[in-house]
Image (tube, helix red, strand yellow):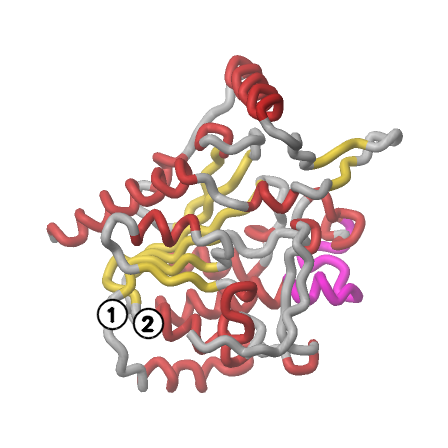
Amino acid sequence: MVFDFAPVIFSPCLQDDLSATLDEPLWFHAAEHVEELRTFARGFKGTRYLHLIDIFGYSKKMSQAWSKRGYKAAQYDILLGGRSDDILSKRGFLNLFRLGLSLVVGGVIIGGPPCAMNVFLSTSVHKRHLLGSKGDLKNKKVRMSNLIVQNLGVFLELLFEEERFFFVVLEQPTSSWLFKLEWMIAMGALLGCRKIHTWLCFFQHDLLKPTHLFGNLTNLEEMARHLTAADRKKYKARLEDRQSKRKRPRAYYKKDAQGRVHGCADLSKTADYTASFCTALFQIWVDAFDQIDQN
């Protein structure tokens, strides 16, 4: 991919994980260019070679899980590719669409869209609980977050429209509003997505991290986990043991005197997928993929 050296606006903190390479007047609204995008798809001359698109995959953990097992994977993240991986730019959207059209039959798109303006920690900013699922549209970050989700939904719907049989799995913390947004609801209904609940602590994550996976992968339910009181105790002890062995214990979040929760410097690390989580998703995907090959 070609890197555009225009400045990328971002913060390393998960509380501000939204990025754009263009000012808002230049943002690409894919829903307003559907016919143009259909023409783009009809003119696609590339080959179908990709097994995975690791979307919003800055850590590259997911794509590495596929690549080391001999499958073709591509990463798509603004902090890796600049404008070419910016879903809010026309160049970035077309690059993503081109990658999508390059998926083999049964290929998969996996990733966690930016959650900063959808989760509990930013409730006072996005105000979705007060103003509805679209949140406070006076806030630029909320508008940015919403358009990322809308463009993602348009991308997946157009890919489906092109009769490209593919799987998708999107991930969010359980407190996120993202899967309640109209664009995700519409896309999910079209692709036959289901939402399952899991806990990333079962996949070697430091924190318990209750998580929703939303997708149409045939056997996605195999990722579901139920946390018991005994599990809570076990994983709390594991974290304490890990922290005791670190030169600098990680600080993820804290509560102030009023009981309000605030993210700390290491909160961004909680967004990285563990090798265990990536391997588990790979295994259920390859099982589904092999079943397609058999048919």
Q: Is residue 267 left or right of residue 149?
A: right
Disc 1 designates what residue? Answer: 48
Crowd rating for badge 1 (residues with CA inside 10 Å; few <14, some 14–19, many 20+): some
Q: Residue at x 29, y 46 (%)?
A: 285
Q: Secondary structure at mark 1?
A: loop
Real-space CA distance between mark 1 and mark 2, rounded to the nearest whole angstrom: 7 Å
Q: Is residue 144 left or right of residue 276?
A: right
Q: Is residue 127 left or right of residue 201?
A: right
Q: Which residues are magenta?
A: 130-145
* Vertical arrangement, residue 272 with respect to residue 57, above or below: above
Asked whether residue 86 is drawn in magenta, I would say no
* Vertical arrangement, residue 248 with respect to residue 12, above or below: above
| Residue 22 visible, this orientation | yes
Q: Quadrant of the N terminus?
A: bottom left
The x, y position of residue 84, in whole percent, is 50, 75
The x, y position of residue 24, in whole percent, is 69, 76
Counting the numbered discs, the total is 2
Tag 1 and tag 2, C-beta contact below 8 Å = yes
Looking at the image, which is closer to me, 244 or 154? 244
Q: Secondary structure at mark 2?
A: helix
| Kind of residue at disc 1 | Arg
| Kind of residue at disc 2 | Leu
Disc 2 designates what residue? Answer: 101
Q: Splitting the image into 4 quarters, where does residue 281 fall?
A: top left
Q: Residue at x 66, y 32 (%)?
A: 248
The x, y position of residue 54, in whole percent, is 41, 57
Residue farthest to the right, as pictured: 257
Q: Residue at x 44, y 56 (%)?
A: 189
